[in-house]
Image: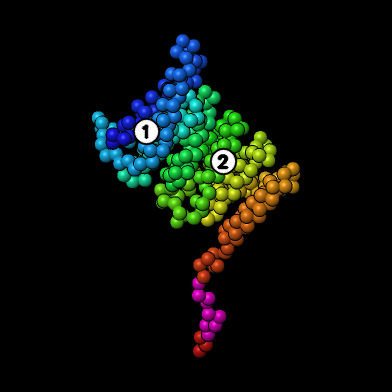
Amino acid sequence: DVMLMSLLPLLRSRRVLEKTVLSPPDEKKGHVLLSEKKALMEHLTSLLKNKICKTRATAMGSTNGQSIVDIAMEDVFCEARRSLSAAHCQCCSASLVLILKALPQPADAIKFDTVYQTAVQEWSTRQTTRLNVCLFDDLLTKLPSIGKALLVSPIAIAAKESPKTYLKSESFRLMSSIFSNASNSESEESYCIEALKSSTHDALTAIDQALKSGELLKAKRARDVLKASEHVVSFICRHGLLDLSLQKTMDSLLEQYKALSKSSPSAGVKQICAKLAEDVGSELEKKQVEVGKPKSALNPTTPKSSKKKKKSKKK
């Protein structure tokens, strides 16, 4: 508890020092004091990232009915929104991972879904935000199951609704990380798999819209979309999620893949699209065969005897 409550004072002190270091130097005080503050700032950075945030914290206490974890999460996110640089946001990111590790059970992290939804929405839509994508990258790297469960829904929405092409591309890159290796349910927690399943429709719709709009069809951006598409489609096929709604979107994607495999100027994009078209086409054919089976094939019954009953002779 003490460790978690010490995060905010340390982060604030680091930000104040960074503000001083980044401001124009005062000629009267000279550069000696500035170099000392810079050294202290770097020491705090190392203390946070390499010492405190690499320990194992356990929070059981509460203040006024609110748990220490809830208070720390709220405080550190507020501090992240005041970051002056990506380096400070990275310190906040490491602190957030430590807070989530302090939960009694990993599945308890789901209670912070609204916190991360707000953060992703702010990052993807507000031009003046100081939140950095490292907040999400670090979470997916260090706590994969928790990160996927918390981020899959807001990232899928950001991929559809972000006003900037660059942020949409970043959202698809994150989506790819979220769905990668998720097709193997044994490697993920059950709460994570359920969160991924509930967001497949939004993810697939975002991919379809991106390919139709054309704004992400340059080779550099297209690879992010296609890589995300590859992982999402694999997850849907693995878990048998291809319902009627998803099937319509997959039909549309199939046409997009076929068109790109012929028209794209990038040989790499053509190759990826050809492979995706083959995989999606195969899955749609399986679904059609499954739906088209006659009832007799699905519920076989014992054939009736071909022998006819003998008619009784009239006397």
Residue type beneath disc 2: Arg
**Of the pair 105 and 117, the residue shown nearer to us:** 105
Up/down of 290 relative to 103, above or below? below
Quadrant holding the N terminus: top left
In screen coordinates, is 195 left or right of 256?
left
Span of residues in magenta: 301-311
Q: Main secondary structure of the magenta part?
A: loop
Crowd rating for badge 1 (residues with CA inside 10 Å; few <14, some 14–19, many 20+):
many
Please name the residue shown 45% across and 19% down the image: 32
Q: Determine if residue 195 is in view.
A: no
Up/down of 243 relative to 121, above or below? below
Q: Secondary structure at mark 2?
A: helix
**Of the pair 23 and 117, the residue shown nearer to us:** 23
Q: Which residue is mark 2?
A: 173
**Of the pair 307 and 215, the residue shown nearer to us:** 215
Q: Position of residue 253 (x, y in %)?
A: 63, 46
Magenta segment includes 133:
no
Q: Which residue is mark 1?
A: 73
Please name the residue shown 59% across and 49% down the image: 230
Crowd rating for badge 2 (residues with CA inside 10 Å; few <14, some 14–19, many 20+):
many
Q: Position of residue 76 (x, y in %)?
A: 39, 30
